[in-house]
């Protein structure tokens, strides 16, 4: 798959809320997921299985999802970015809106790195 095809497929699956399916289909076995320093409850991990587990851990922090949006991807060579907005009620933290830029690196037809900026 090309970077554009991977980006389009990731956006399609994320818009449906199928995050685990996206990770299992599009990510390399040794992919890296980078969170900003000081992220509440999330950390940088390596490996597709660890990324999937991190996603499950994040969703376990949520009582209710109110809305989510994912922009179309912007492509630059072997990289792409999407903007994402997520409104949810978090356990013990109340209702919050998260806005982030998600940057992805592609190699050999798979996502090898994701980095979240928020």
Image (cartoon, rainbow, N blue to C red):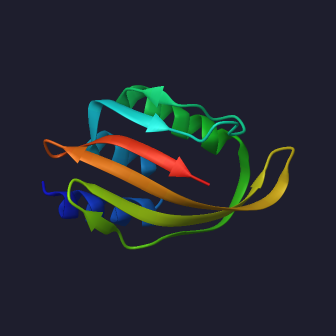
Quadrant holding the N terminus: bottom left
Q: Quadrant of residue 48?
A: top left
Q: Relative to the observer, which residue lies in front, 22 or 113? A: 113
Q: Residue at x 41, y 44 (%)?
A: 114
Visible residue check, residue 39: yes
Visible residue check, residue 18: no
In the displayed structure image, the side of residue 70 where residue 77 appears, left or right: left
Please tell me whether residue 74 is drawn above or below residue 9 in the rendered image: below
Q: Whole-percent x and y of residue 89?
A: 77, 57
Q: Residue at x 49, y 66 (%)?
A: 83
Please tell me whether residue 93 is drawn above or below residue 16 in the rendered image: above
In the displayed structure image, the side of residue 100 where residue 87 appears, left or right: right
Q: Whole-percent x and y of residue 35?
A: 56, 40
Q: Residue furthest bottom?
A: 72
In the displayed structure image, the side of residue 4 where residue 91 appears, left or right: right
Q: Whole-percent x and y of residue 28?
A: 26, 35
Q: Residue at x 59, y 31 (%)?
A: 43
Quadrant holding the C terminus: bottom right
Q: Residue at x 53, y 64 (%)?
A: 84
Q: Whole-percent x and y of residue 58?
A: 62, 41
């Amino acid at each position: 798959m090309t970077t554009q095809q991977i980006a389009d497929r990731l956006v399609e699956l994320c818009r449906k809320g199928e995050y685990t399916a996206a990770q299992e289909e599009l990510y390399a076995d040794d992919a890296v997921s980078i969170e900003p320093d000081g992220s509440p409850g999330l950390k940088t991990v390596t490996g597709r299985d660890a990324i999937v587990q991190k996603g499950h851990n994040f969703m376990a922090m949520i009582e209710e999802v109110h809305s989510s949006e994912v922009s179309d991807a912007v492509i630059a060579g072997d990289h792409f970015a999407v903007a994402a907005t997520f409104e949810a009620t978090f356990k013990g933290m109340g209702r919050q809106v998260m806005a982030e830029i998600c940057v992805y690196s592609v190699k050999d037809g798979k996502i090898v790195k994701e980095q979240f900026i928020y």
